[in-house]
Amino acid sequence: MKVFFTASQRGQGEYGAKYKKIAEALEQHGYKLLDDDILTDSSQSFYSRLEKGGHKTYEEFYKKKIRLIQEADLCVFESSTQSLSIGFVIEKALEFNKPVIVLFTEGNSPVFIQGTSEEKLILHSYTEENIASVLKKVLLEAESLRDKRFNFFISPKLLEYLERVSKKQEITKSTFIRGLILEHMKRHKNDGLDD
């Protein structure tokens, strides 16, 4: 199984060793890391390379991360260091309907994310001593949240409309259809269909 794992570059100094332990534990559980930038790139060289490269480098970095999130079976984030960038990437992973695990050291809870109730979001604290057992638990939970494939046929007219609306809203066709189903579920919550 493929996993997208990242964390705050600004947290490298304080949490870099923990990032490596999380990555090692993921690999021990049989997951393939799609990206190792957070493990191999120092904070200083990361920011220096982006700044020297200018807008094009930022754009390539963004596109790479989005592609990797889309490829992943699930996403894992270490969020002990508060970061708008990590929050944004977490939101993108949820937008792509990926199971998302957000890990944080005790006492460093991601305050804003704690307030959300996303179905595919798993928040869990960890210590250096229990990271392997915490990961084992949350990975099992995340695997149960993975999407199941569902194929169906639609007319060319419906497909054309679906392609136009998904392009205009800058979302995938699947995201649009899921949104319609979720909206229907909300409207018919008390009809006995959600049992």
Image (spheres, helix red, strand yellow):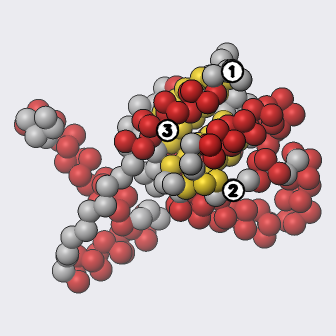
Mark 2: amino acid: Asp
Q: Helix, strand or loop at disc 1?
A: loop
Crowd class of label 2 (few under 14; some 14 to 19; many from 20; radius 10 Å): some
Question: Is residue 158 at least partly visible in the picture?
Answer: yes
Nearer-the-camera pick, 7 or 39? 39
How many numbered marks are there? 3
Residue 35, numbered circle: 2
Query: According to the image, label 3 marks what residue?
Result: 139
Q: Earlier in the sequence, mark 1 or mark 3?
A: 1
Tell me: residue 154, above or below residue 41.
Answer: below
In-image side of 177 versus 24 (left or right): left
Tell me: residue 96, above or below residue 120.
Answer: below
Q: Helix, strand or loop at disc 2?
A: loop
At 64% from the left and 53% from the top, the residue drawn is 33
Query: According to the image, label 1 marks what residue?
Result: 129
In-image side of 80 versus 31 (left or right): right
Mark 3: amino acid: Leu
